[in-house]
Every structure is written in structure tokens, then in C-alpha cells.
Amino acid sequence: MGLCIGSLGSSIACLFGNAFCSLCCAACPACKGSTSSRIAYGLILLVGLITSCIMLIPGLEKTLAKIPALCSGGSKLTDIVMPSIPSIDCQKIVGSLAVYRLSFGMTIFFFLLSLLMINVKSSKDFRAKIQNGFWGFKLLALIGLVVAAFFIPEHGFSQTFMIFGMIGGFLFILVQLLLSIDFVHSWNESWIDHVESGSKKHGYGLLFFTLLFYALSITGIVLFYIYYAPDRSVCRLHTFFISFNLCLCFILSIISILPQVREHNSSCGLLQSSFVSLYVTYYTWSAMSNNPNVACNPSIRSIIHPGNSTTPSPGPTRQQNIFDPITIIGLVMFTIALFYSVFTSSRNHRAKKLFLSSSSTDYSTILDDTSVSDDQGLLGDEEERTGQHVVDDERSSVSYNYSLFHFLFVLATLYAMMTLTNWYEPAKNFSTYNNNYASLWVKIVSSWICIVLYIWTCVAPALFPDRDFS
């Protein structure tokens, strides 16, 4: 009996310790511990995203009410047969308010980990063991935080957390703008090197994608004038946004090919400007879709089937499908940005780009450019590798910033929350989601910042020729 209890206790200890991640990867090829941990945290965020999508399914509350003894007031037969069994209010576990509470619990979870992991230098630190192990305890803590979030009184919670969501979502957009501009510069440099080496297909590829991005941008701008600014006197704000961003995209395209700019920064070109123009076009569309004025903000269904649409009623409230094209595109961009940020932004050289730090400056470990562990630490002893497929590659130094990694997940959680709720003011009823001007300005300002950042990356080497911007 004691042997059985001891075996059960040791099994539970393995579940809640470092062996849990190794057990999950036992059938997989050997991988680094830093990589497996990031994948595990990514899966946690992905599960939260899927759960939030399920909470937003229309008619879910009625479906749950049919389950016996689950929802309060869901079935009269249940109240008669099983009156003593406690039930829950299903209105609290569906809708945008439920997404807010789920996201609140996940935000607190990642934020606490971000604070806890400040100045972790190697896997010898006990906090590194918390980062890469104790998955059972961390999952229980996450579930506890999420459950506790559903008991927070509503008095001002949703409106207050929406403000934090907008700020966090805006910061996540800025991070991805920086990484997107860095990505397109790296893409252009790589293909230009192939073209200079005599590769014609890369030259055709540059031309194809440049024309494609510009064609999509011009098409979008024309459609914006037709559907989002049909009456110039009523939709003056949309007319200004479209025209102003069109002029800015034209200006940044001209700057990209100026001889003075190309002389000091050969990486600037039309591929980057076309990519940025398409990026700005999307955010212009996303911003205008949050305008409370329904006369200037038609639904996608009314655009595709104008004959079936009815005249919108005046007022700031409108009915809209939760998973409209803008939300779907936003989720796709979020997924790509998430994986890109998980495996690039949290690395220390990426952190220097995000914080504009110099490699010669002595910063804390959050910004330190630590190297990957040596071969001995990467491979480990044969005795340690027996039955162990997850290898500790951070014995001498961490391979990515733990604190920055979790902080990016905080921003990603808030951005996902705002994207799923379409940046609307939270409501209990799916048919009364409210547009708001705050989300409109967050997105349109993001598009302007994107243009400013790109122009700066082009003209900075020409304005400061003595500085090294490589």
C-alpha cells in the first residue's frame, strides 16, 4: 500500500516538475530546452485564443442552457428533479465580457512571470527552473487566475480593462511595426544579393511582389472612396484619412528611390515602400471599420449584397457578425506576428533593436547580448541524455530574454482580446457591440507611426552619415 502511494506521489511530482515537458516530447526528436519552453507558452496562449473564440460563438448560451444542471434557469425539469445541485450563470461565461475576464487572468499570469524573470542570466538560477519547468503548478496558477477573474464585480471592470487592452494592443502593434520594417529590409537585402549574384528569378520576384503590393494598395484605396466615403460632406473624417495616407504612401515611395537616400542606404527600395503602403492600407481600413457612424461604415455583407441590406438606423449601435473579414485578417496577422515575435523579438539582439540600445553599452540582462551555450552545455552528458530529449542549452547563459518574452505575451494577450472583440466597447449582447472613436484613433495613429518609422530608417543614414546604422 505504501509502495502504491509512493509511486503515485512520484508520478504526480513528475507531472508538476521539469520532467513533464520532457515526457510530452518523448516521441519527438531532441530539442533545446529554450525552444520547447517557448513552444509550450505559445500553446498556452493559443489555447486561450481558441477558448476566447468559442466564447464568442453566437447562440452558445442557449446551447449550454440545454445541458441539465449546468446553467441556472436553463431547464425547468432540472429545477424540479435536481433542485439542490448548484448551477452557474451561463451569461457570464459567454460573450465579450467573458473574453475580457479570460484575458485578464492570462495577462496577470504572464505579467507576474515577466516580473519574476528579470535579470535571469543562466539556467543555474532557480527562476530559470520555474521558466522551463513546474508546468503543472503554472497551469494550476493560470486556471486559478482565470477562474478568479470571473468573480470580479462588473462595476467598471470592463471599461477599465478595455483601456488597458487598447494601450497594450497599441504597444503590440508598434512592436510588430518595428519587426515588420526590419523584416522587409532583410528580405530586400537578401534578394538583392541574389540578383547581384546573377539570379534572374529573384529579380522577377522583387518586381512581382512590388507590383502586387502596390496593386492591392491602390485597389483598397479606390474601394475606400467608394464604400467608406460615399458622401464627402458626411464622411469627412474618412475622406481625410484616405487622402492623407495616400499622400504619405506616395511620399515614402518617392523617398525610397531618391539618389541621396540610396547613396547612404542602398537597402531602401520600392519593395519596402510597397509593403509599408499595403500595411498602412490595411490599418486605414481597420480604423474606418470602427467608426460609430454607420453611414460611413457599411458592413461587409451590405457591400457584397447591396440589395439585401436595409437602411441602417441612426445611432452609434450596429449589428455585426463577430468573425467578420477584418477580425479574421487581424487574427491571421496576430498568429504570424506571435510566432515571429516568439522566436525573434525575445532574442537579445532583437531586444536591442526594440529598445534602440547599443551593443557597446553595459545594460542589465534584459538587454544583454548573451551567447548560446557551448557545445558541452548543449549536448550534455550521455547519462543525462538517457531518456531525456529536451537538452539544457542555457547552462552558461540564457538564449533569450525571459522577462521580455513574457512581457510580449502580455501585449499579445491584450491585442488578441481587442482583435476578437473588434476593439468594440464590451457588451453582454452580441447584437449591441458598440464602435468607439478610441479604437479608430489607435489604429489610424498606428498607420502614421508605421510611415514615420519607415521614412526614418531610410533617411537616418543620410542625415547622420557618421553613425553606423547597420
Image (cartoon, rainbow, N blue to C red):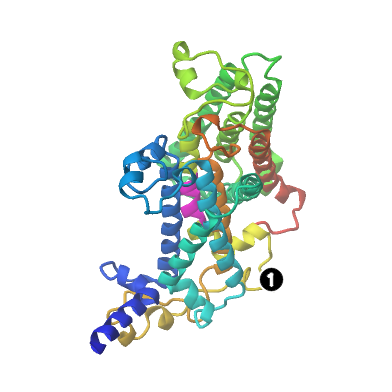
- Per the image, label 1 sits on a secondary structure element best described as loop
User: What residue appears at the point 66 percent right and 30 percent down from the top-left corner?
Assistant: 245
- Confirm whether the magenta stretch covers residue 336: yes
Query: Count the marks: how many?
Result: 1
Q: Is residue 225 above or below residue 265?
A: above
Q: Quadrant of the N terminus?
A: bottom left
Task: Between residue 436 and residue 197, name the one nearer to us.
Answer: 436
User: What residue appears at the point 59 percent right and 50 percent down from the top-left corner?
Assistant: 172
Q: Which residue is mark 1?
A: 360
Viewed as shown, does residue 326 lie left or right of 316?
Answer: left
Task: Between residue 424 and residue 221, name the one nearer to us.
Answer: 424
- Which residue in the rendered view is the most extreme toward the top? 307
Magenta region, main secondary structure: helix
Q: Is residue 192 visible?
A: no
User: What residue appears at the point 70 percent right and 71 percent down from the top-left corner?
Assistant: 361
Magenta-tinted stretch: 334-341
Q: Quadrant of residue 17?
A: bottom left
- Which residue type carries mark 1? Ser
The location of residue 260, given as percent across then percent down, is 71, 42
The location of residue 109, given as percent across then percent down, is 54, 63
The location of residue 448, given as percent across then percent down, is 68, 38
Viewed as shown, does residue 434 lie left or right of 53?
Answer: right
Viewed as shown, does residue 246 lie left or right of 373?
Answer: right
